[in-house]
Each structure stands twice: as structure tokens, then as C-alpha cells.
């Protein structure tokens, strides 16, 4: 044991002297690594003992000019090296590694011999090769293989570069692999097609012991050619037209459009329009990307069939001709109705968001808001009025004991009184800050007096609710409070004879909602549409029997459906049916413009009170986003909020006709009142303020529509 320890202690200094530390670079799996400033060889001494034939073998170092480490003596011969371990050769102890065979047979000592390395590194190969072509513009990398293990810190984006034919450097990333002795350059952005690039290696690149590349190394290559697109041999396809085929809503303006699945060009006579006699209509054809438009030089006739034709002179960019096609449509009927201005009130301000009711002899305007120049937000109005069409004069509504001024309330005529209830009676200066109310008042126009309404048992404060009169009671249902996202599904009945409220059953009631519509069929209240919590579309409805205090669901078969604007639907009662106009946003993708184009379509239905069934109605023309409607002597009259488009449904003829355009444009907020054999439209926002786009100019003008 003692001899064994002596031998171990004797050999460790020698092995330490003959060995080298790992420098932390990329290595192979060798058992030892020399200092990097020397070239390495193996020098093996092997001795067999333990009763076998004694023998020694060693291989001489390649030359006599070698040393163990930089700070050790230089040995001038291999004998000098072997003399340094002579003590081991004379010792009979067994020196072994971890193998069983060596433990039985003898010992082995591995030594390292070194000599200085002064040889510069060389480039062995590059990729892509010099003068090569078709190098991919992206997804490939430049590679350089070196002869020696290099100092990776000297191989950077400054010493390994790529430049285009103008000498502009290409941004990229450089990495070096110690195991593969290779450097790689990856460009950040795709290269240009069919272009020459030059890669350069600077002499600042060195190997691990500091030897530089002897000279700058460079090579050039060419990128791949521009890919050739396959020839376009596919003809364009028409995807949409307006007016659509078989439509009865063609406008007099004579604008006819066709959309295609790709950009098109129009040659002479490519797009024509002719009347039912085959006479060509004069006009101009224009093309914008995927849309071709025919614009008639003159207005078209009402209620006339026209045929649009496309032929092979309409091509795509590649020259492929469209297959000839045609479609026919009928222009709309001549507009109906005559507008007559009514008197302008002297002491009643213009407004928006008000209500209007017809008493049988007068129109009463109440509530709403307008803007004042010295206030940053709108103001509620209290100067309400009554219009007498017989005298064409206005008179004021008393403000004594009147409800607090407000908007988004309901106004309901009982036959003798106007009942105002709910709504918003104040706003903060911040947009969207609202205060809903559960208060109201009763106005008697015969005495020009107000009576208060009890709030005991009244519905919770709300707006955007509905209120209908049954003949004896006011029924309030639904609506939203201060936060429009959380509507109510409750309601109550108000008896003006006793000034008392009683709750409505909630069993089987429709889901909570606001902005819905409600009508009374003489026995039951019918609720439909609106917005549920979220808000999301409420696509169903319910029927309420006030005598039995019972709700039943409306049938869904043949009901309006799809993704509609249920909060904006027009609903009127004809006495026997509830008529519905449901607008719907529609988006069509235009591949040429790479965008979705918004348009509107509509669904029209009627719900029969007696049979409780949904029945079809012919579609109206000019779908709009926010229609409003009234019932007048067998007609459903419907407009968009700006009153620029109006349609009249004639129940007897089961057809639609346009309404003569309103004399003034509105930006919303006007009221429409059916008054026997005429309609009154009054007030509303007339236009956006010229100097402040957040302010709407309001109007106190009104018109009478008669047929």
C-alpha cells in the first residue's frame, strides 16, 4: 500500500506537467487536451509485470524540440523526457487505469508532447461555391469551413460580410461552430432575385492561437431567377350585380354595377343596358378594380324592365374574356305621397330625442334635447308644444307640475291623457353618464294640466323600454338602466284610475332586453326583437295576456332570423297583424380590393294575431340600417333615420312603392306620427355643426305627408 501511494504521488506531478487545461472551446471526446499554443501528439509508455515476460514499449515524440508546458524546462531529446519518469520504470508497483485487464496485467501512462504552432489557418470550402447560381433568396445560409479550430470571437458581422453588386452590406447574423470548424452567415431579409452578391472574410479572423488568415478571402455567387407565374388562362367570373336579377327596386338614376372575382378591363360595348323594347340606353362605363359600372346619361322610367348585358369585350388583366351574360330588373314604382310644410312654432325650440303622440285632433311634442352655444354638452328642453293641424298653429304645454325634463322616455295616449314615463332625466358632462328614472306624469290636453304618478310598485328606473295602452292600463316592460349592457326582463301595469302599479309575471317571460318593440292586438301585448345582455341580438319574442297575467312564447317557425339589427327593426300594428322590417348588415369580400364591403339587406314578415303565425311579406326596396315606421290607412310607411329613403307597403296590393323624398335631410332624432289620413314628421337633428363636429344642429320644422 505504501509503495502504491508513493507511485501515485510520483506520477501526478509528471502528468500535471505533461498535461494541459481545457480552454472551454468546442472539443472532441479526447481524454485530455493540450494548451492551445502547441500541436499535440501521443507518447505512450507501457510495461507488463505480474510474472509475465517483462517488456517495455514507447513511441518517440516526432522531434526533439518539445516541451511540456510554457513554464517548464525544454527537453532537448526524448531521452530527457523518459529520464524524468525513470523512477516509475524502476518501481515494481502496479499503476493502472480503471480497466480489469490493466489491473491484472500492468500499468499504462499517457503523456502529451507539444511543439509551437505558427501555421496560419486556411479556408477549406465555401457554400455556395464561387460563381455558383440559383442561390435561394431566403431560407439558405452561407457557410465557410476552416482548416483549424478558429477563435469564434473574431468571426463576426464585421469580419464575415455579404454585400450586393452596389457594395451595400446585407444585414445578417454570423455564428461559429467549434465542433465543425465552420462559420455560417444568415441574411435577415430575403435577397433580391437574379442578383450577384459577394461574401468577404477579413484578415482579422484568427485561429485559437492567434494566427490570422493570410489574406482577405472573397467569393461571389448569383441568386435564383424570379419565379415564373403560371400563365393566367382563366376567364373572370361575375360574382354580384346591383340591381340584382329580378329585382323590382331598380332606381331611376340608372346606375348598374357588376362585381367580378378579379380586376377587369372594359373595352367598347363591354357593358350595356337596354329597355324592354331592346333600345340601348346611352351611358358611360367605368371600371375600378373588380367593379364595372354603367351610368345612364338620362333617368330611367318608373316600373320598367331593363336588361344589363356583359360581353367578351370585358376581360381580366391577362386578356381572358368574360363569358357573355345578362340579367334583368324592374325599376321601382313612381314615388307616392305629397309633403306639405306645417307652421314653425315661435316659442318651441328645435330638438332631438323627443316623443310625439296624436290625440285625435292634435300632435303633442314633449321632451328631448338640444345644444346651447355656451354649454359643452346638450341640454334637455322644457318648452313643449301642441300642434293643431286645423288651424296650423302651435300652443305651449304647461310646465306646472310637469315631470322633470328628459329623453329616452315613452309617451302613450290613453284617449284622454298623455302618460310620460321613465327615460333619462340628466346626464353628466362625461359622454355616456346617464341617470335613468322611474317617474312620470299624466297630461290632460283638455285642461292643460299635469297629474303626478305614484312610484310605489313602479318598475325600476329604466330607458329604452316599451309602454302600451290596453284600454284601461299602461303596461311598461323591459328596457335598460344606467348601464345599457344589463337590460331588464321585468315590467308593471299602471292603472290611472287608482294611480297604482301592479307587477307583471316573469314566468315564461322573454329574456331581458332593451330597444325592443311592443304592440297591442286588442287583447294581448306582443314583445319582439331588441338587445339582450351583452348586448346581443334578441331574436325571439313573447305574448302577454294582461287579464290572466300569463306569458307565452312566440312561434319561431318562419320568423325573421339570421344576423339582423334586431334593436333597429321597424314594427307596426295593422290591427290584424304585426308587420316587421328587419335590417341586416351584409359583408361581401372584394378580392381585388382585398376588403369586405358592407351593405344592407332586409327581411320583412307579418305576424298574424288571430292565427299566431308568421307570414311572408315581399321584400322592400332600399334596405337601411335604422328604419322607422308607422301604420297609415292600410300602408306601412318606413324611412331610414335621415329620411332620405322611404318605402310604402300597400297591404291591399301586397307591394312596395317609394315615398316621395322628405324635403329636408335629417341626421336622426325626428318623430313620425300617424294622424288619421296623414303623417306628421317633426324636429330631429338637421346636420352636423360646421365648426364643432360633436354638435348636431337641431330643427323645429315639420311636414305633413298625405296620399
Image: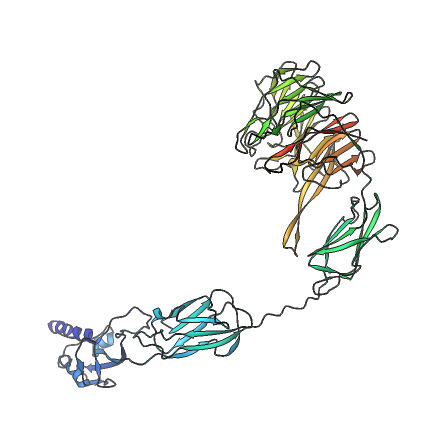
Looking at this view, name the residue that lies furthest to the left: 2
Number of labelled discs? Answer: 0
Q: Residue 618, position in %: x, y?
A: 77, 40
Residue placed most toward the observer, 247 or 190: 190
Quarter of the image with the N terminus is: bottom left
Residue placed most toward the observer, 606 or 204: 204
Q: Residue 407, position in %: x, y?
A: 61, 27
Q: In the image, is 306 to the left or to the right of 357?
A: right
55 lies above or below 190: below
Residue placed most toward the observer, 291 or 555: 291
Residue 560 appears in the figure: no
Q: Residue 385, position in %: x, y?
A: 68, 22
335 lies above or below 470: below
587 lies above or below 183: above
Chosen colour scheme: rainbow
401 lies above or below 465: above
Quarter of the image with the C terminus is: top right
Q: Quadrant of residue 20?
A: bottom left
Residue 443 appears in the figure: yes
Q: Quadrant of residue 487?
A: top right
Q: In the image, is 38 to the left or to the right of 301?
A: left
Q: In the image, is 669 to the left or to the right of 177?
A: right
Q: Residue 406, position in %: x, y?
A: 60, 25
Looking at this view, name the residue that lies furthest to the right: 277
Q: Quadrant of residue 96?
A: bottom left
Amino acid at each position: 500500500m505504501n509503495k502504491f501511494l508513493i507511485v501515485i504521488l510520483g506520477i501526478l506531478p509528471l502528468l500535471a506537467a505533461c498535461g494541459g487545461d481545457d480552454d472551454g472551446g468546442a472539443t472532441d471526446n479526447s481524454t485530455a487536451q493540450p494548451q492551445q499554443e502547441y500541436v499535440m501528439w501521443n507518447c505512450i509508455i507501457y510495461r507488463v509485470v505480474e510474472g509475465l515476460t517483462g517488456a517495455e514499449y514507447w513511441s518517440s515524440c516526432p522531434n526533439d524540440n518539445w516541451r511540456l508546458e510554457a513554464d517548464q524546462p525544454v527537453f532537448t531529446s526524448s531521452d530527457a523526457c523518459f529520464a524524468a519518469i525513470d523512477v516509475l520504470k524502476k518501481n515494481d508497483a502496479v499503476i493502472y487505469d480503471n480497466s480489469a485487464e490493466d489491473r491484472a496485467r500492468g500499468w499504462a501512462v499517457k503523456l502529451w508532447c507539444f511543439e509551437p504552432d505558427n501555421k496560419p489557418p486556411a479556408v477549406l470550402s465555401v457554400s455556395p461555391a464561387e460563381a455558383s447560381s440559383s442561390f435561394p433568396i431566403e431560407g439558405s445560409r452561407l457557410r465557410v469551413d476552416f482548416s483549424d479550430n478558429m477563435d469564434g470571437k473574431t468571426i463576426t458581422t464585421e469580419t464575415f460580410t455579404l454585400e450586393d453588386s452596389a457594395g451595400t452590406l446585407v444585414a445578417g447574423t454570423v455564428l461559429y461552430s467549434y465542433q465543425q470548424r465552420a462559420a455560417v452567415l444568415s441574411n435577415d431579409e430575403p435577397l433580391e432575385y437574379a442578383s450577384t452578391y459577394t461574401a468577404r472574410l477579413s484578415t482579422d479572423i484568427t485561429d485559437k492561437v492567434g494566427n490570422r488568415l493570410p489574406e482577405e478571402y472573397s467569393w461571389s455567387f448569383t441568386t435564383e431567377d424570379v419565379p415564373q407565374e403560371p400563365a393566367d388562362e382563366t376567364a373572370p367570373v361575375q360574382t354580384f350585380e346591383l340591381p340584382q336579377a329580378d329585382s323590382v327596386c331598380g332606381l331611376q338614376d340608372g346606375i348598374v354595377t357588376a362585381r367580378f372575382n378579379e380586376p377587369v378591363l372594359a373595352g367598347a360595348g363591354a357593358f350595356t343596358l337596354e329597355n324592354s323594347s331592346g333600345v340601348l340606353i346611352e351611358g358611360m362605363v367605368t371600371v375600378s378594380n373588380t367593379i364595372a359600372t354603367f351610368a345612364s346619361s338620362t333617368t330611367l322610367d318608373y316600373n320598367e324592365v331593363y336588361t344589363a348585358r356583359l360581353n367578351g369585350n370585358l376581360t381580366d388583366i391577362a386578356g381572358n374574356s368574360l363569358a357573355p351574360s345578362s340579367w334583368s330588373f324592374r325599376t321601382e314604382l313612381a314615388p307616392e305621397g305629397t309633403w306639405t310644410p306645417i307652421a314653425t312654432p315661435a316659442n318651441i325650440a328645435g330638438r332631438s330625442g323627443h316623443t310625439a303622440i296624436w290625440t285625435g285632433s292634435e300632435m303633442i311634442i314633449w321632451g328631448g334635447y338640444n345644444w346651447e352655444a355656451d354649454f359643452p354638452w346638450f341640454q334637455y328642453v322644457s318648452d313643449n308644444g301642441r300642434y293643431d293641424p286645423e288651424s296650423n298653429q302651435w300652443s305651449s304645454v304647461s310646465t306646472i307640475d310637469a315631470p322633470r325634463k328628459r329623453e329616452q322616455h315613452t309617451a302613450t295616449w290613453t284617449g284622454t291623457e298623455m302618460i310620460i314615463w321613465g327615460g333619462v332625466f340628466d346626464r353628466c358632462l362625461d359622454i355616456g353618464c346617464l341617470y335613468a328614472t322611474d317617474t312620470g306624469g299624466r297630461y290632460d290636453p283638455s285642461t292643460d294640466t299635469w297629474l303626478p304618478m305614484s312610484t310605489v310598485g313602479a318598475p325600476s328606473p329604466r330607458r329604452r323600454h316599451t309602454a302600451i295602452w290596453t284600454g284601461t292600463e299602461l303596461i311598461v316592460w323591459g328596457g335598460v338602466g344606467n348601464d345599457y349592457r344589463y337590460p331588464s326582463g321585468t315590467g308593471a301595469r299602471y292603472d290611472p284610475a287608482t294611480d297604482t302599479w301592479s307587477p307583471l309575471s316573469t314566468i315564461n317571460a322573454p329574456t331581458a332586453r332593451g330597444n325592443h318593440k311592443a304592440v297591442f292586438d286588442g287583447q294581448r301585448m306582443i314583445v319582439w326583437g331588441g338587445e339582450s345582455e351583452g348586448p346581443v341580438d334578441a331574436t325571439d319574442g313573447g305574448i302577454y295576456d294582461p287579464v290572466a297575467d300569463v306569458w307565452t312564447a312566440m312561434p319561431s317557425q318562419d320568423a325573421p332570423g339570421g344576423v339582423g339589427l334586431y334593436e333597429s327593426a321597424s314594427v307596426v300594428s295593422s290591427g290584424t297583424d304585426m308587420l316587421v322590417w328587419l335590417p341586416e348588415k351584409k359583408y361581401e369580400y372584394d378580392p381585388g380590393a382585398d376588403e369586405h364591403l358592407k351593405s344592407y339587406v332586409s327581411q320583412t314578415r307579418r305576424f298574424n294575431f288571430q292565427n299566431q303565425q308568421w307570414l311572408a311579406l315581399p321584400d322592400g326596396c332600399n334596405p337601411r340600417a335604422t328604419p322607422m315606421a308607422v301604420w297609415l290607412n292600410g300602408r306601412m310607411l318606413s324611412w331610414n333615420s335621415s329620411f332620405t329613403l322611404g318605402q310604402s307597403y300597400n297591404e291591399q296590393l301586397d307591394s312596395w312603392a317609394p315615398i316621395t323624398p322628405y324635403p329636408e335631410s335629417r341626421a336622426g332624432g325626428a318623430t313620425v306620427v300617424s294622424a288619421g289620413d296623414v303623417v306628421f314628421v317633426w324636429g330631429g337633428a338637421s346636420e352636423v355643426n360646421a365648426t364643432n363636429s360633436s354638435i348636431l344642429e337641431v330643427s323645429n320644422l315639420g311636414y305633413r305627408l298625405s296620399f
